[in-house]
Image (tube, rainbow, N blue to C red):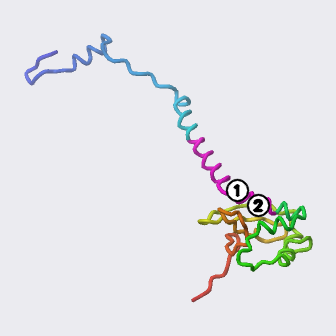
Amino acid sequence: MVLTGLGVFMSEKIIGSLIYGDHVVPKKQRPWKQRIVLPLSITILVLLIIVGAYKFINYREEGSVERFLTNVRNGNYDTAYANWDVTDGHYSMKQFMEDWGKDGYYGKALASARISDSNSKGTVVIVYVKFQGFKAPVSFLVDKETLKMSFSTLNKYVKTQRSIS
């Protein structure tokens, strides 16, 4: 420690500790490649969980539509119709066969039918089925509780003209 006319000069203590090795040795850092592994692993895991949740969030409802399509493909029309929501009685077995029978509107393209997307809307899920030859996927409304299905009036792939008021 050096005394001067203006006060005490403290640099000698710091310099002395650096010279004589009395200071704390700084901790060596790991290379950046090792430091990035943990945060990157956590980020990838979180992304996989999010993608998996998005992919399988409507698994039961999509499975219900897939079973329906399989039943119609195999000619089990009574079983397929039993999965259809007919609580209002607006869709009779005759109409069902006109739509889904071998020569029906959807029955002709049934071999190429595959589920393309689904969206949850409260107590129901809208499942989109792509048919070859159709411009847009056909939308089905599946009840989350009963897994009964019907045609949906909502289809995010079909642009509707809004009325001008």
Residue found at x 32% / y 12%? 21
Q: In which quadrant will I find the N terminus?
A: top left
Q: Nearer the viewer, residue 160 or 100?
A: 100
Against 8, residue 118 (above or below) is below
Q: Label 1, on which residue? A: 60
Q: Nearer the viewer, residue 58 or 116?
A: 58
Residue found at x 57% / y 44%? 46
At mark 2, the secondary structure is strand
The stretch of residues the image draws in magenta is: 43-68
Q: Label 2, on which residue? A: 115
**Left or right placement of residue 74 versus residue 127 in this view:** right
Mark 2 crowdedness (10 Å alpha carbons): few <14, some 14-19, many ≥20: some
Q: Nearer the viewer, residue 70 or 51?
A: 70
In the rendered image, residue 140 lying in the magenta stretch gets the answer no
At mark 1, the secondary structure is helix
Against 130, residue 93 (above or below) is below
Mark 1 crowdedness (10 Å alpha carbons): few <14, some 14-19, many ≥20: some
Against 40, residue 22 (above or below) is above
Q: Quadrant of residue 129?
A: bottom right
Between marks 2 and 1 in the image, the one whose residue lies nearer the viewer: 1
Q: Quadrant of residue 146?
A: bottom right
